[in-house]
Image (tube, rainbow, N blue to C red):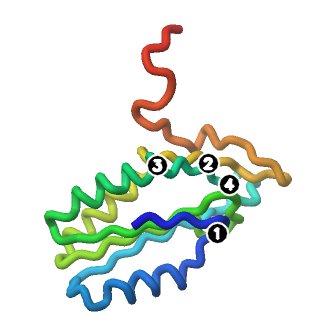
């Protein structure tokens, strides 16, 4: 399940709801990851653009990858502006086994950072400025076969 929200995430509401949804599913482990916008480089916050069709396809690939282990994934991300000290990203793994959940959350969050079609902008003096130095190029993105 991928949930997209305008603005910052309501962390307590989302985590409580996800826990309630899965509380009778007989999972032995529930491991959430909460990403928070931190103060750095004079930013007021971050702003996000999300390409939803590719994000859902990427997420569905992960769901299929963890299904044989009996695990479930959930994810929420912000669109638009998120100020410093607010949350823009939540991921959670529910699994019958603790080791599967621990390994999955680490791999999932790292792959999200490298592969998810989400573009990040710094908010400085009320302006959106592309955060190129803190962005990761998506494999296969850009002009294919272009010659310099």
Of the two numbered discs 2 and 3 on the same chain, state the one appearing first in sequence.
3
Label 1, residues with CA under 10 Å away: few <14, some 14-19, many ≥20: many
Label 4, residues with CA under 10 Å away: few <14, some 14-19, many ≥20: many
What is the secondary structure assignment of the residue under circle 3?
helix
Residue pictured at 61% horizontal, 48% vertical: 120
What is the secondary structure assignment of the residue under circle 2?
strand
Q: Which residue is mark 4?
A: 47
Q: Disc 2 and disc 1: Cα gap in Å? A: 14 Å
Instruction: Please tell me the numbered disc located at residue 8.
Output: 1
Q: Disc 2 and disc 4: Cα gap in Å? A: 6 Å
Q: Disc 4 and disc 1: Cα gap in Å? A: 10 Å
| Image x and y of residue 111, in percent | 37, 50
What is the secondary structure assignment of the residue under circle 1?
loop
Q: Which residue is mark 2?
A: 120
Residue pictured at 34% horizontal, 58% vertical: 108
| Image x and y of residue 140, in percent | 41, 30
Contact (CB < 8 A) between labels 2 and 1?
no
| Image x and y of residue 36, in percent | 57, 67
Of the two numbered discs 3 and 4 on the same chain, state the one appearing first in sequence.
4
Q: Which residue is mark 3?
A: 53
Residue pictured at 67% horizontal, 48% vertical: 121
Contact (CB < 8 A) between labels 2 and 4?
yes
In screen coordinates, is 120 left or right of 102? right
Q: Nearer the viewer, mark 1 or mark 3?
A: 3
In screen coordinates, is 109 left or right of 119? left
Of the two numbered discs 2 and 1 on the same chain, state the one appearing first in sequence.
1
Of the two numbered discs 1 and 3 on the same chain, state the one appearing first in sequence.
1
């Amino acid at each position: 399940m991928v949930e997209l929200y305008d603005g910052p995430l309501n962390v307590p509401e989302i985590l409580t709801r996800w826990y309630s949804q899965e509380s009778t599913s007989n999972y032995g482990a529930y491991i959430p990851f909460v990403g928070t916008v931190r103060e750095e480089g004079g930013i007021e916050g971050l702003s996000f653009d999300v390409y939803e069709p590719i994000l859902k396809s990427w997420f569905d690939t992960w769901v299929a990858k963890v299904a044989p282990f009996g695990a479930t994934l959930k994810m929420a991300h912000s669109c638009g502006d998120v100020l410093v000290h607010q949350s823009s990203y939540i991921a959670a793994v529910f699994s019958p086994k603790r080791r599967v959940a621990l390994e999955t959350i680490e791999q999932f969050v790292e792959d999200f950072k490298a592969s998810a079609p989400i573009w990040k902008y710094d908010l400085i003096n009320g302006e959106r400025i592309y955060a190129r130095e803190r962005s990761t190029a998506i494999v296969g993105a850009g002009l294919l076969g272009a010659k310099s």
